[in-house]
């Protein structure tokens, strides 16, 4: 919703509002694990890698190949092996796994240099497969790529889809676009309030930014912004939940894989 013209007070040119909102969002720090806990986790990771590698060799399941690729990509339970991870992601993507397609797109975008020659067009095509299937990180990346090429409307459509799933970087980017040149102060404030609500902590800079945005609106405009914030986040899609589950999604796949042949 856009505010009426009298509600605007043209504060977007202030230095505080020109600063990218994304830079003002600071996530809380996780507590460091103890040495015994790290040792236990390392042992568990090695065992997990062995199980996933064995199961992926027995079952024609693209999801298992994707997870094996993730273990190799991140060096979990094994030495990092990016070429092998990329090959597994390619195989899984060709078999229909859209999360694997996203990872192929990441490699083609140059996220890990030297593994494969960068190809922006192909990177977009692979990431768009995952974006269309509902993956929030892919939607954000597609939005960023379109924004880079000047397609603001297309970028904002993809960023909004990711933002409504609770992706704060996408929300911050949308808020910055709305605040740019005083374009849409109601939307800028509403989305900044979404960022505040989803942040682990509110920084002084973020509080000051919200105050500056509120000062540029009348009471009706502020109410519209609060209404936008209240109904904005609709929740993650099933695919995004699957991606966020990470290795927790592996156990059902391992349970469904064919058993190992008996030893002779």
Image (tube, helix red, strand yellow):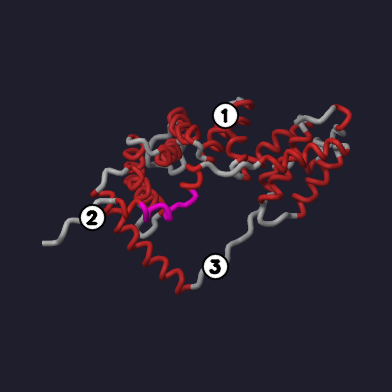
Residue labelled with disc 1:
146
Q: CA distance from mark 1 to mark 3?
A: 38 Å
Mark closer to the observer (2, 1): 2
152 part of magenta stretch = no
Residue 230 x %, y %: 72, 43
The reply to whether callout 2 and callout 3 are in contact (CB within 8 Å) is no
Residue labelled with disc 3:
32
- Which quarter shows the C terminus? bottom left
- Few, some or many residues within 10 Å of mark 1 (<14, 14–19, 20+): some
Q: CA distance from mark 2 to mark 1?
A: 46 Å
- Comparing 233 with 106, the one in front is 233
58 on left or right of 235: left
Image quarter for residue 191? top right
Magenta residues (range): 244-252
For marks 2 and 3 on the same chain, the one whose residue lies earlier in the sequence:
3
245 on left or right of 173: left
Residue labelled with disc 2:
259
């Amino acid at each position: 919703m856009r505010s009426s013209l009298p509600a605007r007070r043209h504060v977007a040119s202030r230095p505080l509002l020109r600063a990218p909102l994304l830079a003002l969002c600071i996530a809380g720090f996780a507590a460091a694990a103890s040495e015994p806990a790290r040792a236990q986790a390392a042992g568990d990771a090695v065992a997990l890698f062995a199980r996933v590698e064995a199961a992926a060799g027995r079952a024609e399941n693209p999801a298992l190949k994707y997870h094996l690729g993730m273990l190799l990509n991140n060096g979990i339970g094994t030495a990092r092996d990016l070429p092998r991870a990329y090959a597994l992601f390619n195989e899984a993507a060709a078999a229909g796994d859209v999360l694997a397609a996203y990872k192929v797109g990441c490699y083609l975008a140059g996220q890990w240099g030297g593994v494969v020659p960068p190809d922006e067009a192909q990177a977009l095509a692979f990431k768009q497969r995952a974006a269309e299937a509902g993956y929030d990180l892919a939607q954000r990346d597609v939005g960023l790529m379109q924004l880079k090429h000047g397609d603001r409307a297309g970028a904002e459509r993809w960023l909004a889809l990711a933002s409504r799933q609770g992706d704060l970087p996408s929300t911050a980017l949308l808020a910055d676009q709305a605040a740019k040149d005083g374009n849409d102060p109601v939307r800028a404030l509403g989305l900044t309030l979404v960022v505040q609500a989803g942040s682990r902590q509110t920084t002084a800079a973020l509080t000051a930014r919200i105050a500056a945005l509120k000062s540029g609106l009348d009471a009706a405009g502020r109410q519209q912004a609060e209404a936008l914030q209240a109904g904005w986040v609709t929740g993650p899609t099933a695919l995004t939940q699957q991606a966020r589950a990470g290795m927790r999604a592996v156990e059902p796949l391992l349970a469904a894989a064919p058993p190992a042949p008996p030893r002779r």
